[in-house]
Image: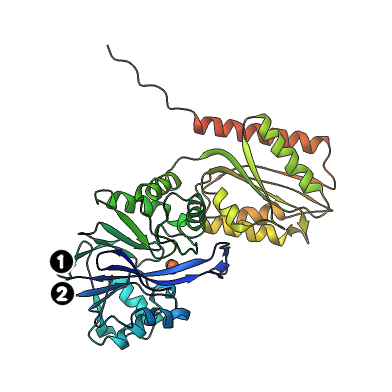
Amino acid sequence: MNARQIRERVQWLGVIDWNRRMFDALIPIPDGTSYNAYLVQGSEKTALLDTVDTADVATLMAQLAHVPTIHYVVAHHAEQDHSGAIPAVLQKYPEAQVLCTPKAKELLIDHLPIAAERIQTVADGATVSLGDKTLQFIQAPWVHWPETMLTYLREDKILFTCDLFGAHFATSALYAGDEPAIYEAAKRYYAGIMMIYRKQIQNHLKKIQPLELDLIAPSHGPIYNNPAHILDAYRDWTADGVANHVVIPCVSMHGSTNLMVEHLIGALADRGVTADKFDLTVSDPGKLAMALIDAATIVFGTPTLNMGPHPLVLAATHLADALRPKLRYAAIIGSFGWGSKAPDTIAALIPNLKVETLGTVMCKGVPKADTFAALDALADSIAAKHAALLAPPPAAPVVV
Ligand code: FEO
């Protein structure tokens, strides 16, 4: 892919990675991804904003073949999918300085062969003039490491956000428009990468609120030419409220746990509560992560294997705990042949979920009437808790 013009003397550079299917060896990315860099050429100086993955250095260097000078390399984030080509760029342009946060300087030196004297740190709100274009730096830690920042190109009203607002989505289209598939990819990306930093992102959204924005240009996926679309989505996903919804990651070995899960889903539906069942032998962890964005309750469903939870449930439990969704309640259901410590093991694996536990329903062998009655009681409890959570606040007294 050749360099592409976004605005006058502002270009997209980078790599479209059509074939990548996993990120961080954790969440599937069915639509591939891209590593976007941006070249901003002012009347006096030129800046390169981010680079590309270490594996794709040659592609970026070919795109820079006809760029005579780069004065600044802005490193929003030290992770190698964006910083991987910085050493090659610094070698080609001996006058170039890296601009980044103080924390990013430390991390860049840790991760890449970059000499400290080639790196200049910038403060929150600092500006650098390129002549007729101005870069304004906005510190925005934890999207998705502690060193991250954004850059606002004032004259063109473009906010460069690196990982923040990204989408793992390979396309030759430069702009996202209101394409539903890109919204879905951005939601999957938020769930898997950004959700843990929900509170920090709430602050970042407030911080960028005053900026006039024509474009939001992330370093994964297409550019948002309707910035309100992705900003509204992020406000929705990061909001403190939860939905009247239950997520049930589960496995069944001989069918007992599955009977219990199906009964619970029906009982919840009878009480006006929706549920998503994720059979972990076939489910996509990305879909599970997306369902956790606003669910109020998680119910783990597990058979017992060697006294503990099934290993796939263990993995899903750890994933849910690591992503730190805004869940309020949890419960554990399942089955065993002669004995089980599965509920204790699962309960000990979710220290980051600030949830109230609504109980455990475990059955020996196949579920019988008492098991189904206990599941009905659990559904009652979930429905009552959700109703209390979602009830509108009492109206203020009318003063006459
Ligand atoms: Fe796209 Fe955190 O790197």
Q: Quadrant of the N terminus?
A: bottom left
Instruction: Tell me the amino acid under the disc marked 1.
Output: Asp
Question: In terms of image quadrants, where is residue 147?
Answer: bottom left
Q: Which residue is mark 1?
A: 132
Residue 159, x across and y down, in percent: 30, 59
How was the colour assigned to the protein in this rendering? rainbow
- Describe residue 14's horizontal placement relative to residue 293 as left or right: left
State yes or no: Cβ of the residue under disc 2 lies below 8 Å from any atom of ligand 1.
no
The single residue placed furthest to the top in the displayed view is 400
- Describe residue 181's horizontal placement relative to residue 299 as left or right: left
Camera-nearest residue between 29 and 207:
29
> Residue at horizontal 56%, vertical 63%?
29
> Residue at horizontal 31%, vertical 88%?
91
Query: Which sits earlier in the primary sequence, circle 2 or circle 1?
Result: 2
Q: Quarter containing ligand 1?
A: bottom left
* Callouts 2 and 1 close, C-beta under 8 Å: yes
Residue 328, x across and y down, in percent: 53, 43
- Describe residue 396's horizontal placement relative to residue 285 as left or right: left
Residue 153, x across and y down, in percent: 24, 62
Camera-nearest residue between 90 and 367:
90
- The crowding category of the residue bearing disc 1, from other C-alpha atoms within 10 Å (few below 14, some 14 to 19, many at least 20), is few
- The crowding category of the residue bearing disc 2, from other C-alpha atoms within 10 Å (few below 14, some 14 to 19, many at least 20), is few
Q: Which residue is mark 2?
A: 44
| Above or below, comparing residue 400 to residue 339 in the picture | above
Instruction: Tell me the amino acid under the disc marked 2.
Output: Glu
- Describe residue 58's horizontal placement relative to residue 277 as left or right: left
Question: In terms of image quadrants, where is residue 218?
Answer: bottom left
| Above or below, comparing residue 122 to residue 226 in the picture | below
